[in-house]
Image: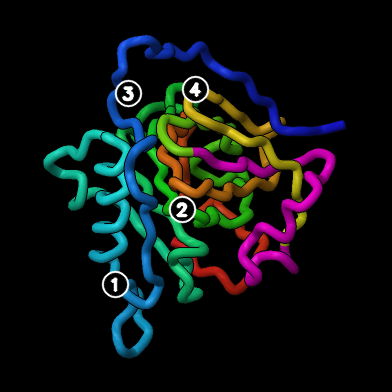
């Protein structure tokens, strides 16, 4: 059987002090967003508001907001008008195209709002790079990381309705802070579904080429 590969990293626990770990959301109200707020009167996605939402998510979790975060943050609603259900925020720290093959690496942080889905996709080989192999370390919040393997009962019904008919992989790994999950093989289709507090995670991989990305849902617009 082919499946996602995952492991839980060691986690420190603060106990007996009456204090919560930095960034804890235990006593905070739920963070929610109204989909209509992200669109103008003509239904066009307002990227600045998407960025503001992810920055709010960062602050909610006690994640550092760097001086150039808003300027460099990439956001998308994939052109389908339901940003709170299907979308993504990404901040690249390294993706050096100028390095020779074999020395190219990617490091980026990904952001999903509560219940938001990073839609199913996969990565091909291109003239710039070999196929992308990747894994994700959850830092804050939680996510169901979806890939090849035995279908997880009830997962299909949790996906946004617009993505259910096109889903081809439904093996879900529930990932919480300290959990690392990676693809079982290159070119495997994969997706993610954020938990009720959203998710912030670090992705490590070889070089990312936008031209290599293919989405299962033909209605999606990328990048």
Instruction: Point out the image quarter for the N terminus.
Output: top right
First in sequence, mark 2 or 4: give its number: 2
Crowding at mark 3 (Cα within 10 Å: few <14, some 14-19, many 20+): few
- Is residue 86 placed above or below 73 in the rendered structure? below
Mark 4 secondary-structure assignment: loop
Crowding at mark 2 (Cα within 10 Å: few <14, some 14-19, many 20+): many
* Residue 156: in magenta span: yes
First in sequence, mark 2 or 3: give its number: 3
Mark 2 secondary-structure assignment: loop
- Is residue 170 placed above or below 6 in the rendered structure? below
Name the mark nearer the viewer: 2 or 3: 3
Of 25 and 18, which appears nearest the observer? Answer: 18
- Is residue 156 placed above or below 138 in the rendered structure? below
Mark 1 secondary-structure assignment: loop
C-alpha distance separating marks 4 and 1 = 33 Å
Q: Which mark is residue 114?
A: 2
Q: Which mark is residue 20?
A: 3
Q: Residue furthest left?
A: 67
Residue at screen point 43% across, 28% down? 105
Mark 3 secondary-structure assignment: loop
Q: Are marks 2 and 4 in contact (CB under 8 Å)?
A: no
Name the mark nearer the viewer: 2 or 1: 2
- Which residue bears the numbered disc 1? 46
The residue range painted magenta reads 142-166
Crowding at mark 4 (Cα within 10 Å: few <14, some 14-19, many 20+): some
- Which residue bears the numbered disc 4? 178
C-alpha distance separating marks 2 and 4 = 19 Å
First in sequence, mark 4 or 1: give its number: 1
Q: Are marks 1 and 3 in contact (CB under 8 Å)?
A: no
């Amino acid at each position: 059987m082919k499946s996602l590969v995952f492991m839980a990293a060691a986690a420190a626990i603060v106990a007996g002090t009456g204090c919560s770990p930095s960034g804890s959301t235990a006593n905070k109200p739920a963070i929610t967003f109204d989909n209509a707020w992200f669109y103008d009167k003509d239904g066009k996605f307002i990227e600045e508001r998407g960025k503001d939402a992810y920055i709010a998510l960062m602050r909610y979790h006690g994640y550092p907001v760097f001086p150039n975060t808003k300027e460099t943050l990439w956001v998308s609603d994939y052109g389908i008008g339901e940003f709170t259900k299907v979308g993504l925020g990404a901040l690249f720290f390294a993706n050096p195209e100028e390095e020779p093959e074999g020395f190219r690496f990617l490091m980026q942080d990904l952001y999903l709002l509560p219940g938001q889905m990073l839609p199913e996709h996969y990565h091909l080989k291109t003239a710039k790079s070999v196929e992308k192999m990747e894994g994700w370390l959850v830092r804050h919040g939680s996510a169901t990381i979806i890939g090849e393997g035995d279908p997880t009962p009830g997962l299909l019904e949790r996906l946004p309705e617009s993505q259910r008919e096109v889903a081809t992989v439904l093996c879900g790994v529930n990932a919480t802070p300290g959990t690392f999950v990676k693809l079982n093989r290159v070119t495997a289709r994969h997706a993610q579904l954020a938990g009720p507090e959203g998710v912030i995670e670090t992705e490590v991989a070889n070089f990312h080429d936008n031209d290599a990305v293919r989405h299962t849902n033909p209605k999606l617009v990328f990048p």
